[in-house]
Each structure stands twice: as structure tokens, then as C-alpha cells.
Image: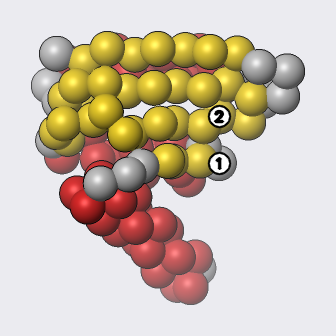
């Protein structure tokens, strides 16, 4: 199960993911992200309460990061995930 909390501030949207970003919850998270993406404001995604991510969830987070969203995390596992996504993006930019 995944709980998504959305907060709008003047210049940014804050998405908080709590639970597992896996299975059918990835589709729900993508719907929420795409709806706030249309605003054109900065998006910050808080992963501090994320307890698991499957391959589709990782792909979604990478897409969010590629589109300019800031991924925020604490804890060893979530920080490693964010760092890995950031490194993959830098590698792609070097090759283009």
C-alpha cells in the first residue's frame, strides 16, 4: 500500500510517498505526479517514509527526476536509491 500526500505551496508542489511504491501503486503515483506536473511549478518528492520500491517504481522515480523533480530521502536505502538515480542521469547526459 502507498499513501500519497500532496501539498501545494506558492512555487512548488510537495509529494510525500509513504509505504511501498510497487505494483498498482506505481500507476497511482504516476497519475498524481502527472497531474501536478501540468502546473509548471517545481515538484519535490519526499521519500523518507518509503519502505520499498519495485522496478516500475524505480523507473517512475527516474522519470520524475529526469523531468526536474527533486527527490528527497533519508536513511541508507532511500538515499542510495536517490544517488543511484542521479548517477544514472549524469551518465546518460555524458553520452548524449
Q: Secondary structure at mark 1?
A: loop
Q: List x then y, in percent, for residue 53.
A: 20, 41
For residue 43, which numbered disc appears in the image? 2
Tell me what residue is drawn at x 14 percent, y 25 percent.
23
Q: Is residue 67 visible?
A: no
Q: Is residue 19 rendered to the left or right of residue 12?
A: left
Please give the label number shown on residue 68.
Answer: 1
Image point 31% across, 14% down: which residue?
3
In which quadrant of the rendered image does the C terminus lie?
bottom right
**Is 67 positioned to the left or the right of 3 in the image?**
right
Marks 1 and 2, Cα distance to the nearest angstrom? 7 Å
> Viewer-nearest of labels 1 and 2?
2
Q: Quadrant of residue 20?
A: top left
Residue at coordinates 67% horizontally, 25% vertically from top-left? 13
Above or below, 2 against 79 in this view is: above
Position of residue 34 measured from the top left corner of the image (x, y, whole percent):
55, 22
Q: Are marks 1 and 2 in contact (CB under 8 Å)?
A: yes
Amino acid at each position: 500500500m502507498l499513501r500519497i500526500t500532496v501539498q501545494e505551496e506558492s512555487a512548488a508542489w510537495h509529494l510525500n510517498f509513504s509505504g511501498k511504491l510497487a505494483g498498482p501503486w506505481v500507476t497511482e503515483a504516476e497519475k498524481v505526479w502527472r497531474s501536478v506536473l501540468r502546473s509548471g511549478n517545481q515538484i519535490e518528492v519526499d521519500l523518507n517514509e518509503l519502505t520499498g520500491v519495485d522496478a516500475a517504481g524505480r523507473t517512475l522515480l527516474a522519470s520524475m527526476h529526469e523531468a526536474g523533480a527533486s527527490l528527497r530521502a533519508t536513511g541508507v536505502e532511500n538515499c542510495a536509491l536517490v544517488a543511484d538515480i542521479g548517477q544514472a542521469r549524469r551518465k546518460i547526459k555524458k553520452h548524449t
